[in-house]
Image: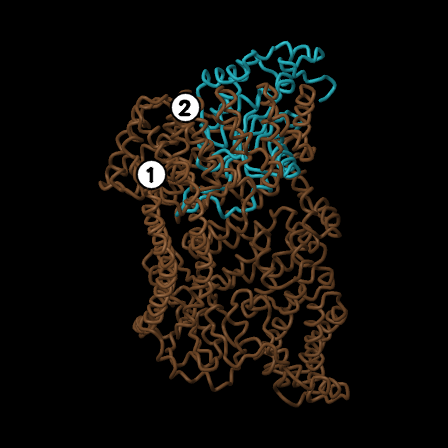
C-alpha cells in the first residue's frame, strides 16, 4: 500500500503532505526534509527511485526476506519532478514502482485538467482541491481509482462549483474557494 | 462559521509547514459538524491532517461520523469514508462498522469503492471487520456486472490482504484469472499478478495455468510497467523454479532475461534500467548462469552516472561472480575507484579532515560530512563518487571475494594485492568510525560490530582471514602486512592513519605478530612496531601493537640466541632496552587497556633485560628465560578459524561462580608485593601474562576466550580416551583422512597431534608447499575442559578442491566448530541459531518491537481466517466458536510448525557434527504436551458457552448480534495475544 504522498517545490517547501499512518508533525517535517535532501541532489538523468532516507531505513533487515516477499515496512520511494514541484510516493513493496510513476502522472494530469494548465500557485491557493483529488485516487493508502476521467469527474461532483483558475493567476483577488471560503491573501 | 472554516483552512496549511495544530481539535470538530458541504469538507480535511490516535475529541466525533456516513448526499457521504482511514481506532471501528457495511451496496460506485478501501483500513486495526465485511467484498469482486473501477479497487484491497493470508484467497483464483486475461486495466493486472506471485507457492497447479497468459503478456504488452511486473511475478512466484518441464522453465527464464536486457539497452530510460537490475537481482539467486551471460550490460551499468543504478549493478555483480569472471569484475571496480576523483582524498586534505573530526568523536560528527559530500560531488557529476559509495564498493569487492570461504578465488596472491590496493583507496570517513567505537566503551562485541561499518577494518579482517585460512600464501600475507606496517614508518604513518587506514593496523599488527616466523625481516617489523609515532595512534591500535611486540621480539631472540656471544648479548639487550623505552611512556597512557598491557609487558621486558645482563658469556646458549620461557608463551597452538557459534557450545563449567572473588586475600598479597618479594611477584606476573590471551586471537575464536589456556606440558591433553565419544561422522572423516595420508611422508598420525606444540606441523606444511598436503593435518586439538571434551576440527575442504585443475592449489581452512555432548548443549545451540537465523517468526517478533516509521501494523490480520462460508454475515455463534477453535488450533499448529522449522534448521547446521537425535526428540515431545495442555485450557471455557450460543441462534438479528460477538471476541483475544509469548518462551530454550 501507499504510506505517504508528498508534494514539495524545488526549495523544499511542502505543498501537500498526506500520511496514511498517524505521525507526529515534527517527524513528518524531518522526513520531508530528509527526502528533499535526497531528491534535490539527484541529477535529472537519474532514475526516479530513491534510496530510503535514514529515518525510514531503521529496519534494513526487514526488506523482502525469501520466506515472506512482502511486509508492512515502506520500502519504495518513487518521485517525479514537474517544473517546480516534486511529487513523492512512499509505499511498501506491494506496489509496483513503474505503476506508481504512472499513478503520479495520472494525478498530475488530473490536476492539470481541473486547473487547466496547472502551476504551483494553483496548488497553493487551492490545496483543498489538491487534497480532494488525491482523495479520489487513494483512500487510506489503497488506490481506488486510476482512470483520469473518473478522478476528474469525482472531484467536480464534490466541488460542484469548479475552482476558478484565475485564482491562480490573480492571487491578490483572494477569491480562494468559491462558496465564501475565501482564503485570504498575505499568507504564504 | 465561514470565518472559522477559513481560519481552519489556513491552519491546515500552516500545519503542513510543521506547526502544531492539535490545540484546535475541538474547533475542527465544530467545523466538521457544519451543514454546508464545503465547510464540512474543510473540517474533515483538518481531521485527516491533524488528528492522532490520542486526540481526545475523537470520541465526540463518533456520532457525527455515523450521521455523515448515512447522509443521503454522495459527496457528504464520501467525506467520512475518506477520512476514516486516517483517524481510525479500534473502538471507533467497532462503533462504525455497522454503519459502513450497508455502504458496500450503495448505488454509487464511487461510494462503493471508497467503502471497500475504508473497510480495509478498519480491518487493519480491528480484524473482526473482515468477518462481516468479507462476504460482501467477495460478492463485489465476483459480480461480473460490477463497475470496473469498483472491481479494480476491490482487487487492490484483496491484493493488500492477499500477501498476509494467501491461503484464504486461493478460492478467488479463477475469478482473478479471468480478470487478468480480459481485464484491460493495467493497474489491476499488475495487482493481480502481484497477488498470484504470493499464491503460486501454495498452489503449484496455478503455475501451469498462469504460464501461457503471462508469457503472452510479456510478449505483447506495450506497457512497460505491466511487462516488468509480469517478469517480476514470474520470478517471485517461483514460476522459474516451479515449471515441471525444464524446457519450459528455461524458455520463460530466457525470455524474461532477454526482455530485461532490452529494457536496459534499448530504452535508455534510467527507471527501466533500475527496475531491470532489480529484477536481475532477484533472478540471480536461482539462475546465476543466465545473469552471467548479461555481464557486459551489467558492468556497463556499474559505470552509469546514476548512483542508485550503480549500487544495484554492484549488488548484482556480487551475486553473479564466479571463478571465471571475478578477476575481471574486481579489476573493473578497482579501476573505477582509482580513476574517480574524490574530494578530500589527498593526504593534506585527509589530515586536516582527521583533525577536524577528532575532537567531536561522536556519531553526529559524521553526518554533516555525509550530507555535504554528495552536494559537492554533484557539481562534477560525471566521475566523482560519494564516499559512501566508495565504501560500498570496497565492501562489495570483499564480499565477492570472500563468498563461500573464498571458493571463487584461484589466485590468492592476486587477492592480497587487491587488498593492499584497496587500503590506499579507502575514503577518509573510516577514521571517525574508529574513534566512535573507542569512545563508546571498547568491549569486544562493540568492536566487532562497528568494524563491519568500517571499510579499512574490513580489509584488515580479510587480510587476516586469508593469512589464517590459507596457509600457502601466509608468507605473502605477512609480507604485505609488513609492508603496510612500514608504510607507517616515518611520515607515511600519519598519512595512512589520516586516510582512514588506521582500522587496518590492528589486524596488520596481529598478523605480523602471530606469523612472525614467516616474516622476512623481523627486525624491520619490530622497528615499525616500536616506532615512537605509534604512541599517537588510537588505543585500540596500540593494544594490538603491544601484543605483537613481544611475539616479534621472541622470534628474533629464539632465532639468534642459539649461539650466544658477546655481540649477540649487546644486540639483545639493546633491543630489549629499546622496547622498554617504547613502553615506558605507554604505561601512563590515558587508556586503561593500553596501560595495563604495557605495564605487564614492561615488567616482562625488565626481567628479560636482567636475565641478559646477568647471563655470563661462558654458556653457549642464551638465558633460559629468553630461549625457552618466552617462546612458549606464544607458540602453543596454531590458531585456526573458529565458527562464530562455537562459543555458545562450550558448556558452562558447573563449578564456575562468577560472583566469587578470585583471591580473597588480595590486599595482603598486594602488601606482600610491595615488600618486594621478587620471586613471587615475578611468578604472578608470569602467570597473569600467560593467562591473558592476545585480543585479536579472541576476536577470531571466541571459544578460546574462556577456555583455560593450554599449557604445553599439561598431561591432560594426552587423555584421548574421551574422544571415543566423538560421533561417527567425525570418526569417518578422520579415517578417510588417515587413509588418504597414509603414504604421505609429511603427514603425522592423529595420535601424535595432541602433543600440544604444533610448530613442527606448521613447518611441515610450509616446506611441503605446492605438493598435495592437506590442510587437514592441522592438529586436532583436544582441550580438556572439566569433564567435557572439545574437539576442534579443521574440516576437510581439500577434497573438492583437489578435483579442480589449477596451477596452484590453495587450501582454505573452514571454521571450526564444536560438537555436542548432551541435549543441554544442543538446546543452547538451538537457541542461538534462533537468534541468528533470519527466521520469519523472529522477524515478526522483532518487527513488533521495533516498528518502522510509517508502517501499518497488520499483524492482527495474520491470525484471521477469511475462509468462512458465504452466509457469514448472519453467522451463528456456534459457528464462530468453531471457527475460533479452529483458529486457535491453527495458531498452535503454526507455532509448532515454526518450532519444527527452526529445529530443522539448527539440525541441518549440526548435521555434520552429528548431534544426538534422542536429545532433541525428547524435547519435542515435551513441547507438544505443553502445547496441548494450553490448548485444552482454552477450550474448557468454550464448552460453557455453547448453550448461550443456542439462544443466539434464535435471536439471530443482525444488529443485536454484533455486540455479544465482540465481547466474546475480546475474551478470545487473550490466548491469541499470548501466542507471541509462547514463541518467546520457546526461544529461551
Between residue B543 and residue A104, name the one nearer to us: A104
For this view, does B35 lie left or right of residue B208? right
Q: Position of residue B119 (x, y in %)?
A: 45, 34
Q: Position of residue B350 (x, y in %)?
A: 70, 46
Residue A184 falls in which quadrant of the image? top right
Between residue B824 and residue B530, name the one nearer to us: B824
Q: Quadrant of the C terminus of chain B?
A: bottom left
Question: What's the colour of chain A in the image?
Answer: cyan
Answer above or below: position of B984 versus B850.
below
Q: Chain of mark 2?
A: B
Question: What's the colour of chain B in the image?
Answer: brown
Q: Position of residue A29 (x, y in %)?
A: 65, 35
- Considering the numbered disc 1 on the image, is that residue within a helix, a strand or a loop? helix
For this view, does B950 lie left or right of residue B1? left
Figure disc tally: 2
Residue B108 falls in which quadrant of the image? top left
Q: Chain of mark 1?
A: B
**Distance (Cα) linking label 1 and label 2:** 20 Å
Between residue B130 and residue B564, name the one nearer to us: B130
The colouring scheme, among rainbow, by chain, secondary structure or one colour, is: by chain
Answer above or below: position of B662 versus A37.
below
Q: Residue at x 44, y 19 (%)?
A: A147
Report the residue marked by disc 2.
Answer: B106
Q: Is residue B794 visible from the viewing direction of this image?
A: yes
- Considering the numbered disc 2 on the image, is that residue within a helix, a strand or a loop? loop
Q: Residue at x 54, y 13 (%)?
A: A160
Q: Position of residue B785 (x, y in %)?
A: 48, 79
Q: Are marks 1 and 2 on the same chain?
A: yes
Report the residue marked by disc 1.
Answer: B872
Q: Crowding at label 2, few (<14), some or many (≥20) Cα neighbours within 10 Å? A: some
On residue A118, which mark appears? none
Amino acid at each position: 500500500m501507499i504510506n505517504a504522498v508528498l508534494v514539495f517545490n524545488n526549495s523544499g517547501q511542502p505543498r501537500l503532505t498526506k500520511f496514511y499512518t498517524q505521525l507526529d508533525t515534527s517527524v513528518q517535517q524531518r522526513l520531508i526534509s530528509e527526502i528533499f535532501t535526497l531528491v534535490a541532489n539527484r541529477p535529472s538523468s537519474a532514475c526516479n527511485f530513491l534510496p530510503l532516507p535514514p529515518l525510514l531505513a531503521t529496519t534494513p533487515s526487514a526488506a523482502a526476506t525469501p520466506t515472506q516477499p512482502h511486509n508492512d515496512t515502506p520500502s519504495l520511494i518513487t518521485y517525479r519532478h514537474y517544473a517546480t514541484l516534486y511529487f513523492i510516493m512512499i509505499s511498501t513493496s506491494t506496489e509496483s514502482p513503474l505503476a506508481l510513476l504512472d499513478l503520479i502522472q495520472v494525478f498530475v494530469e488530473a490536476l492539470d485538467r481541473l486547473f487547466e494548465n496547472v502551476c504551483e500557485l494553483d496548488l497553493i491557493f487551492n490545496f483543498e482541491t489538491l487534497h480532494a483529488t488525491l482523495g479520489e485516487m487513494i483512500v487510506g493508502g489503497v488506490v481506488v481509482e486510476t482512470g483520469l476521467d473518473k478522478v476528474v469527474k469525482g472531484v467536480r461532483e464534490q466541488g460542484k462549483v469548479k475552482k476558478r483558475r484565475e485564482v491562480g493567476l490573480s492571487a491578490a483577488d483572494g477569491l480562494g474557494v468559491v462558496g465564501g471560503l475565501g482564503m485570504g491573501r498575505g499568507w504564504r | 462559521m465561514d470565518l472559522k472554516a477559513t481560519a481552519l483552512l489556513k491552519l491546515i496549511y500552516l500545519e503542513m509547514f510543521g506547526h502544531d495544530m492539535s490545540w484546535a481539535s475541538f474547533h475542527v470538530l465544530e467545523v466538521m459538524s457544519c451543514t454546508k458541504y464545503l465547510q464540512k469538507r474543510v473540517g474533515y480535511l483538518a481531521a485527516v491532517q491533524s488528528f492522532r490516535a490520542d486526540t481526545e475529541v475523537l470520541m465526540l466525533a463518533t456520532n457525527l461520523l455515523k450521521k455523515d456516513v448515512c447522509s443521503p448526499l454522495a459527496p457528504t457521504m464520501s467525506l467520512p469514508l475518506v477520512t476514516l482511514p486516517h483517524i481510525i481506532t479500534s473502538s471507533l471501528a467497532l462503533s462504525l462498522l455497522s454503519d459502513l457495511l450497508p455502504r458496500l451496496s450503495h448505488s454509487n460506485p464511487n461510494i462503493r469503492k471508497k467503502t471497500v478501501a475504508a473497510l480495509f483500513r478498519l480491518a487493519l486495526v480491528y480484524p473482526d471487520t473482515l468477518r462481516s465485511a468479507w462476504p460482501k467484498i467477495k460478492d463485489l469482486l465476483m459480480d461480473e456486472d460490477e463497475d470496473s473501477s469498483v472491481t479494480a479497487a476491490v482487487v487492490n484491497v484483496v491484493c493488500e490482504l492477499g500477501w498476509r493470508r494467501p491461503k484464504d484467497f486461493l478460492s478467488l483464483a479463477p475469478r482473478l484469472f479471468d480478470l487478468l486475461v480480459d481485464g484491460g486495466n493495467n493497474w489491476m493486472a499488475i495487482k493481480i499478478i502481484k497477488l498470484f506471485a504470493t499464491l503460486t507457492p501454495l498452489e503449484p497447479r496455478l503455475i501451469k495455468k498462469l504460464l501461457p497468459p503471462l508469457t503472452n503478456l510479456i510478449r505483447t504488452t506495450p506497457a512497460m510497467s505491466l511487462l516488468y511486473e509480469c517478469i517480476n511475478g514470474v520470478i517471485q512466484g517461483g514460476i522459474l523454479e516451479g515449471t515441471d518441464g525444464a524446457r519450459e522453465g528455461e524458455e520463460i527464464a530466457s525470455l524474461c532475461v532477454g526482455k530485461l536486457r532490452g529494457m536496459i539497452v534499448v530504452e535508455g530510460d534510467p527507471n527501466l534500467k533500475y527496475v531491470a537490475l532489480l529484477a536481475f537481482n532477484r533472478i540471480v539467486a536461482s539462475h546465476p548462469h543466465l545473469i552471467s551471460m548479461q555481464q557486459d550490460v551489467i558492468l556497463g551499468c556499474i559505470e552509469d552516472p546514476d548512483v542508485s543504478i550503480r549500487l544495484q549493478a554492484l549488488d548484482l555483480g556480487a551475486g553473479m561472480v564466479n571463478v571465471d569472471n571475478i578477476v575481471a569484475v574486481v579489476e573493473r571496480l578497482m579501476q573505477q575507484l582509482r580513476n574517480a576523483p574524490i574530494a578530500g582524498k589527498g593526504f593534506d586534505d585527509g589530515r586536516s579532515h582527521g583533525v577536524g573530526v577528532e575532537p567531536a568523536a561522536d556519531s553526529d560528527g559524521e553526518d554533516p560530512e555525509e550530507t555535504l559530500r554528495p552536494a559537492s560531488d554533484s557539481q562534477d557529476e560525471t566521475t566523482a563518487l560519494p564516499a559512501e559509495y566508495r565504501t560500498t564498493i570496497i565492501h562489495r569487492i570483499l564480499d565477492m571475494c570472500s563468498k563461500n570461504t573464498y571458493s571463487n578465488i584461484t589466485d590468492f596472491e592476486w587477492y592480497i594485492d587487491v587488498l593492499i590496493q584497496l587500503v590506499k583507496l579507502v575514503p577518509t570517513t573510516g577514521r571517525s568510525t574508529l574513534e566512535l567505537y573507542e569512545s563508546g566503551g571498547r568491549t569486544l562485541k562493540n568492536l566487532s560490530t562497528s568494524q563491519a561499518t568500517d571499510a579499512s577494518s574490513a580489509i584488515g579482517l580479510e587480510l587476516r582471514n586469508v593469512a589464517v585460512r590459507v596457509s600457502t600464501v601466509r608468507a605473502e600475507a605477512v609480507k604485505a602486512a609488513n609492508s603496510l606496517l612500514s608504510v607507517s614508518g616515518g611520515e607515511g604513518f600519519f598519512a595512512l592513519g589520516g586516510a582512514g587506514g588506521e582500522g587496518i593496523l590492528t589486524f596488520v599488527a596481529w598478523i605480523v605478530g602471530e606469523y612472525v616466523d614467516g616474516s622476512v625481516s623481523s627486525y624491520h617489523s619490530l622497528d615499525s612496531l616500536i616506532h615512537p609515532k605509534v604512541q599517537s595512534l588510537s588505543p585500540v591500535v596500540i593494544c594490538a601493537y603491544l601484543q605483537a611486540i613481544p611475539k616479534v621480539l621472541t622470534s628474533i631472540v629464539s632465532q639468534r640466541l642459539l649461539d650466544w656471544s658477546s655481540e649477540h648479548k649487546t644486540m639483545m639487550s639493546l633491543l630489549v632496552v629499546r622496547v622498554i623505552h617504547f613502553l615506558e611512556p605507554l604505561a601512563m597512557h590515558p587508556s586503561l587497556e593500553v596501560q595495563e598491557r604495557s605495564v605487564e609487558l614492561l615488567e616482562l621486558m625488565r626481567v628479560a633485560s636482567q636475565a641478559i645482563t646477568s647471563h655470563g658469556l661462558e654458556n653457549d646458549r642464551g638465558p633460559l628465560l629468553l630461549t625457552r620461557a618466552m617462546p612458549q608463551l606464544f607458540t602453543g597452538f596454531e590458531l585456526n578459524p573458529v565458527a562464530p557459534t562455537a562459543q555458545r557450545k562450550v558448556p558452562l563449567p558447573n563449578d564456575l561462580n562468577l560472583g566469587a572473588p578470585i583471591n580473597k586475600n588480595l590486599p595482603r598479597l598486594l602488601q606482600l608485593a610491595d615488600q618486594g618479594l621478587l620471586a613471587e611477584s615475578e611468578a604472578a606476573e608470569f602467570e597473569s601474562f600467560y593467562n591473558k590471551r592476545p585480543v585479536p586471537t579472541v576476536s577470531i575464536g571466541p571459544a578460546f576466550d574462556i577456555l583455560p589456556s593450554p599449557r604445553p606440558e599439561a598431561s591432560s591433553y594426552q587423555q584421548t580416551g574421551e574422544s571415543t565419544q566423538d560421533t561417527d561422522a567425525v570418526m569417518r572423516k578422520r579415517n578417510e583422512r588417515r587413509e588418504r595420508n597414509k603414504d604421505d611422508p609429511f603427514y603425522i598420525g592423529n595420535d601424535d597431534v595432541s602433543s600440544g606444540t604444533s610448530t613442527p606441523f606448521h613447518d611441515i606444511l610450509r616446506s611441503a608447499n605446492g605438493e598435495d598436503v592437506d590442510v587437514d593435518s592441522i592438529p586436532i586439538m583436544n582441550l580438556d575442559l572439566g569433564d567435557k571434551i572439545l574437539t576442534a576440527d579443521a574440516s576437510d575442504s581439500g577434497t573438492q578442491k583437489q578435483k579442480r585443475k589449477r596451477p596452484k592449489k590453495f587450501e582454505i581452512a573452514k571454521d571450526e566448530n564444536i560438537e555436542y555432548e548432551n541435549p543441554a548443549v544442543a538446546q543452547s545451540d538451538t537457541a542461538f541459531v534462533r537468534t541468528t537465523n533470519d527466521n520469519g517468526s523472529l522477524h515478526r517478533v522483532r518487527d513488533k518491537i521495533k516498528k518502522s516509521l510509517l508502517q501499518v501494523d497488520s499483524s492482527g490480520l495474520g491470525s484471521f481466517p477469511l475462509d468462512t462460508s458465504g452466509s457469514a454475515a448472519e453467522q451463528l455463534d456456534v459457528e464462530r466458536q468453531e471457527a475460533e477453535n479452529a483458529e486457535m488450533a491453527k495458531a498452535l499448529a503454526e507455532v509448532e510448525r515454526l518450532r519444527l522449522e527452526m529445529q530443522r534448521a539448527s539440525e541441518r547446521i549440526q548435521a555434520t557434527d552429528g548431534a544426538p537425535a534422542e536429545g532433541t526428540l525428547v524435547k519435542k515431545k515435551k513441547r507438544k504436551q505443553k502445547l496441548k495442555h494450553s490448548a485444552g485450557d482454552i477450550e474448557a471455557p468454550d464448552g460453557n458457552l455453547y448453550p448461550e450460543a443456542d439462544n443466539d441462534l434464535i435471536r439471530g438479528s443482525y444488529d443485536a448480534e454484533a455486540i455479544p460477538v465482540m465481547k466474546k471476541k475480546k475474551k478470545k483475544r487473550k490466548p491469541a495475544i499470548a501466542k507471541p509469548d509462547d514463541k518467546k518462551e520457546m526461544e529461551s530454550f
